[in-house]
Image (cartoon, rainbow, N blue to C red):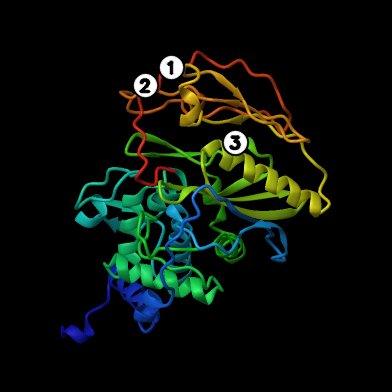
Amino acid sequence: MADGNRPTSGKSIKNLRLRKWAALFASVTVGALTTVGHAHAQYAGQISSIVMDSKTGAVLSQTNPDLRRYPASLTKLMTLYMTFNALRAGAISLNQAVPVSIHASTMEPSKLGLVPGSRLTVEQAVLALVTKSANDAACALGELIGGGSEPQFAAMMTQQAHAMGMNQTLFRNASGLPDPDQMTTARDLATLGRRLIADFPEYYHYFSTPAFRFHGRYIPNHNPMLKVYAGADGMKTGYTQEAGRNLVTSAIRDNVRLVGVVMGASSNTQRSLVMANQLDHGFDAEGVAPVARPLLVAQAPSTLRHRSHRGALIIAAANRKHTPLEVAEAPTARRHHAAITKVSHGRHATVIGAKVHTISTPSIRRSTARHSTAHNRT
């Protein structure tokens, strides 16, 4: 049979669809890589934040929302947007194999530890991004959609961002690992959060995934707001030393959905508290009845650890409405354990409803986990 008459396999059709889908972005690749200029100042210690009504886009509160900053792992929100877009177009499928290149395997932590030549499914990659914020999985997914090239995928991300009105955003990679040119703003990220919710309701549930298993390992979700803020059901954390602690959260109460962004916090504790306060004010502005804030569980800021032994309770400064209690260091599984069998034995604490309860904290082990300040760990 002549080559032109060979029946086309399902795999070939899918590859053709992916190439055609990626080609839609090719004509603007160069422009997308160079549209937004450099921004040198990262406003150390200065927080940018914004809260929007998800449906209307109304801004309910904001603080320096247009300062251009490093997104860190919030970059993965756009990687996921591009993935959901490709899924919707039929260019890829959830059970499709994602090849792991040498380049993807060499990404810095946080990562799954993928081996060159191995494969994971698109759905596993999505889960790895929303839970562990795995940089190797993000890169592999970007290479799949970008025709084998992460820079090509980053250009596609930038083009999509600008088409959505995120004009102060430039992407250089799929993960958010440090790049001096990769910039965004709190306002742009709020726009992205709103679009993820509105454009892909069938995939939004992934953001509330508490954990998933990968090759026998238990991979918990890094996002603390899912556990400590009533109504929160997504989206993503981010951290690098240069960016500070970043967070995008969506929460819904009484059929009112808000999207909040906090960038540049100095600690995870501050990041969570600022977000909770901003969302509270947003719901109040929308006429939603207040809800008592649950216990916040966080690790002690490094500046406080020398003042007390690990496991000490730190009482956070209470705002006028709520008095959250923070456990400085939650119980942690010993490092040699390959898997965590129960969430309560890991880095998570169960919050009952939305009321404040006194909980007895299990004996707290000394953490042996390594902490990196150079890579996006959350």
| Residue corresponding to mark 3 | 227
Q: Nearer the viewer, residue 93 or 147?
A: 147
| Residue corresponding to mark 2 | 334
Percent across and percent down for residue 184 are: 49, 63
Disc 1 to disc 2: CB gap under 8 Å: yes
| Residue corresponding to mark 1 | 365
Q: Residue 152 lies in what quarter of the image? A: bottom left
Label 2 – label 3 distance at C-alpha:
22 Å
Q: Is residue 293 left or right of residue 360?
A: right
Mark 2 residue element: loop
Mark 3 residue element: helix
Number of residues whose C-alpha sits closer than 10 Å to that of mark 1, classed few (under 14), some (14–19) or many (20 or more): some
Number of residues whose C-alpha sits closer than 10 Å to that of mark 3, classed few (under 14), some (14–19) or many (20 or more): many
The residue located at (40%, 46%) in the rendering is 241
- Compare marks 2 and 3 and give the one earlier in the sequence: 3
Residue mark closest to the camera, 1 vs 2:
1
Mark 1 residue element: loop
319 w.r.t. 243: above or below: above
Percent across and percent down for residue 200 are: 56, 63
The residue located at (61%, 59%) in the rendering is 64
Q: Amino acid at mark 1?
A: Arg
The residue located at (44%, 75%) in the rendering is 159
Q: Amino acid at mark 2?
A: Arg
Percent across and percent down for residue 3 are: 17, 83
Number of residues whose C-alpha sits closer than 10 Å to that of mark 2, classed few (under 14), some (14–19) or many (20 or more): some
In the orientation shown, which residue stands out farthest toward the top? 363
Percent across and percent down for residue 155 are: 37, 72
- Compare marks 3 and 1 and give the one earlier in the sequence: 3
